[in-house]
Amino acid sequence: MSKTEVVFPENRALYERDRYSAAIRSGEHLFVSGQVGSRSDGSPEPDFPAQVRQAFRNLESVLSAAGCSFRDIIDVTSFHTDPESQFAAVMEAKNEAFPQAPYPAWTAVGVTWLNGFDFEIKVIARIPD
Protein backbone atom coordinates (compact mmCIF):
# COMPACT_ATOMS: atom_id res chain seq x y z
CA MET A 1 0.00 0.00 0.00
CA SER A 2 1.35 3.42 -0.98
CA LYS A 3 2.03 5.98 1.70
CA THR A 4 0.43 9.35 1.04
CA GLU A 5 2.05 12.66 1.86
CA VAL A 6 0.63 16.17 1.80
CA VAL A 7 2.60 18.76 -0.20
CA PHE A 8 2.35 22.53 0.28
CA PRO A 9 4.19 25.38 -1.42
CA GLU A 10 5.66 28.19 0.66
CA ASN A 11 2.52 30.34 0.44
CA ARG A 12 -0.33 28.51 2.20
CA ALA A 13 -2.88 31.36 2.59
CA LEU A 14 -5.58 29.95 0.30
CA TYR A 15 -5.15 26.36 1.52
CA GLU A 16 -5.35 27.32 5.18
CA ARG A 17 -8.32 29.60 4.60
CA ASP A 18 -10.29 26.97 2.66
CA ARG A 19 -8.84 23.91 4.48
CA TYR A 20 -7.52 21.69 1.70
CA SER A 21 -4.16 20.29 0.59
CA ALA A 22 -2.24 21.78 -2.32
CA ALA A 23 -1.22 18.31 -3.46
CA ILE A 24 -1.04 14.70 -2.35
CA ARG A 25 1.93 12.51 -3.19
CA SER A 26 0.89 8.86 -3.51
CA GLY A 27 3.31 6.29 -4.83
CA GLU A 28 4.76 7.52 -8.13
CA HIS A 29 2.14 10.24 -8.63
CA LEU A 30 1.39 13.75 -7.45
CA PHE A 31 -2.26 14.81 -7.44
CA VAL A 32 -2.38 18.61 -7.47
CA SER A 33 -5.52 20.45 -6.37
CA GLY A 34 -6.92 23.08 -8.68
CA GLN A 35 -4.63 26.11 -8.82
CA VAL A 36 -6.09 29.54 -9.39
CA GLY A 37 -4.60 32.95 -10.07
CA SER A 38 -4.53 33.98 -6.43
CA ARG A 39 -2.24 36.64 -5.11
CA SER A 40 -0.24 36.05 -1.91
CA ASP A 41 -3.24 36.99 0.26
CA GLY A 42 -5.49 34.46 -1.54
CA SER A 43 -7.47 37.07 -3.49
CA PRO A 44 -8.01 36.79 -7.27
CA GLU A 45 -5.71 38.57 -9.69
CA PRO A 46 -8.24 40.90 -11.40
CA ASP A 47 -6.73 40.97 -14.94
CA PHE A 48 -7.59 37.68 -16.72
CA PRO A 49 -4.30 37.08 -18.60
CA ALA A 50 -2.41 37.93 -15.39
CA GLN A 51 -4.72 35.58 -13.44
CA VAL A 52 -3.89 32.72 -15.81
CA ARG A 53 -0.14 33.40 -15.59
CA GLN A 54 -0.44 33.52 -11.79
CA ALA A 55 -2.31 30.20 -11.78
CA PHE A 56 0.55 28.64 -13.75
CA ARG A 57 3.10 30.18 -11.33
CA ASN A 58 1.11 28.82 -8.38
CA LEU A 59 1.02 25.40 -10.06
CA GLU A 60 4.77 25.57 -10.63
CA SER A 61 5.27 26.37 -6.93
CA VAL A 62 3.29 23.29 -5.85
CA LEU A 63 5.10 21.07 -8.35
CA SER A 64 8.46 22.39 -7.15
CA ALA A 65 7.58 21.71 -3.51
CA ALA A 66 7.16 18.05 -4.51
CA GLY A 67 10.35 17.92 -6.59
CA CYS A 68 8.44 18.03 -9.89
CA SER A 69 8.25 20.38 -12.87
CA PHE A 70 5.94 20.96 -15.83
CA ARG A 71 7.84 18.19 -17.67
CA ASP A 72 6.44 15.68 -15.14
CA ILE A 73 2.78 16.52 -15.75
CA ILE A 74 0.84 13.72 -17.45
CA ASP A 75 -2.76 14.93 -17.15
CA VAL A 76 -4.35 18.40 -16.97
CA THR A 77 -7.91 19.51 -16.30
CA SER A 78 -8.65 23.20 -16.65
CA PHE A 79 -11.81 25.06 -15.74
CA HIS A 80 -12.92 28.24 -17.54
CA THR A 81 -15.80 30.64 -16.81
CA ASP A 82 -15.87 31.90 -20.42
CA PRO A 83 -13.81 29.49 -22.54
CA GLU A 84 -14.34 31.15 -25.90
CA SER A 85 -13.17 34.62 -24.87
CA GLN A 86 -10.42 33.25 -22.60
CA PHE A 87 -8.91 30.80 -25.08
CA ALA A 88 -6.08 33.02 -26.39
CA ALA A 89 -4.77 33.97 -22.93
CA VAL A 90 -4.88 30.36 -21.74
CA MET A 91 -3.13 29.09 -24.89
CA GLU A 92 -0.36 31.65 -24.45
CA ALA A 93 0.34 30.49 -20.89
CA LYS A 94 -0.05 26.83 -21.89
CA ASN A 95 2.47 27.21 -24.73
CA GLU A 96 4.98 28.81 -22.34
CA ALA A 97 4.57 26.00 -19.80
CA PHE A 98 4.68 23.21 -22.41
CA PRO A 99 6.87 24.49 -25.27
CA GLN A 100 7.52 21.09 -26.85
CA ALA A 101 6.23 17.54 -27.08
CA PRO A 102 5.41 15.32 -25.38
CA TYR A 103 2.41 17.33 -24.20
CA PRO A 104 0.21 16.20 -21.32
CA ALA A 105 -3.32 14.94 -21.84
CA TRP A 106 -5.65 17.93 -21.36
CA THR A 107 -9.36 18.35 -20.68
CA ALA A 108 -10.89 21.85 -20.62
CA VAL A 109 -14.25 22.34 -18.91
CA GLY A 110 -16.54 25.38 -19.06
CA VAL A 111 -18.02 26.25 -15.67
CA THR A 112 -20.18 29.00 -14.22
CA TRP A 113 -18.47 29.51 -10.86
CA LEU A 114 -14.92 29.32 -9.49
CA ASN A 115 -15.28 31.15 -6.17
CA GLY A 116 -14.30 34.55 -7.57
CA PHE A 117 -11.75 33.25 -10.07
CA ASP A 118 -12.12 32.77 -13.84
CA PHE A 119 -9.56 30.01 -14.44
CA GLU A 120 -8.41 26.95 -12.52
CA ILE A 121 -5.92 24.23 -13.43
CA LYS A 122 -5.42 20.85 -11.75
CA VAL A 123 -2.90 18.22 -12.73
CA ILE A 124 -1.55 14.76 -12.13
CA ALA A 125 2.22 14.45 -12.39
CA ARG A 126 4.65 11.59 -12.08
CA ILE A 127 7.25 11.92 -9.36
CA PRO A 128 10.72 11.83 -10.95
CA ASP A 129 13.15 9.15 -9.82
Image: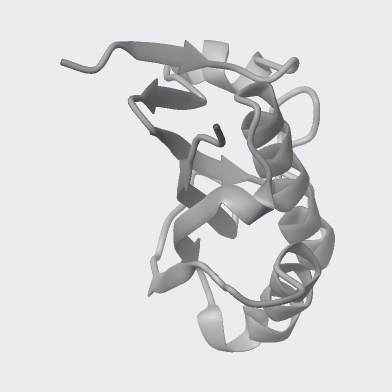
- The residue sitting at 58% across, 73% down in the picture is 102
Q: Position of residue 78 (x, y in %)?
A: 48, 62
- The residue sitting at 57% across, 73% down in the picture is 103
**Front residue of 121 and 63:** 63
- Image vertical order of residue 107 relative to residue 43, above or below: below
Q: Quadrant of residue 106?
A: bottom left
The quarter of the rendered structure image containing the N terminus is top left
Is residue 121 visible in the rendered image? The answer is no
- The residue sitting at 57% across, 42% down in the picture is 35
- Image vertical order of residue 40 relative to residue 108, above or below: above
Q: How many marks?
A: 0
Is residue 46 visible in the rendered image? The answer is yes
Q: Position of residue 28 (x, y in %)?
A: 38, 32
Q: Quadrant of residue 21?
A: top left
Q: Position of residue 75 (x, y in %)?
A: 42, 59
- Looking at the picture, the colour scheme in use is one colour
- Image vertical order of residue 76 relative to residue 27, above or below: below
- Image vertical order of residue 80 relative to residue 129, above or below: below
- Is 90 on the left or on the right of 82, as rendered? right
- Is 118 on the left or on the right of 98, as rendered? left
Q: Quadrant of residue 67?
A: top right
- The residue sitting at 59% across, 59% down in the picture is 118
Q: Position of residue 14 (x, y in %)?
A: 60, 23
Q: Residue furthest front?
A: 129
The quarter of the rendered structure image containing the C terminus is top right
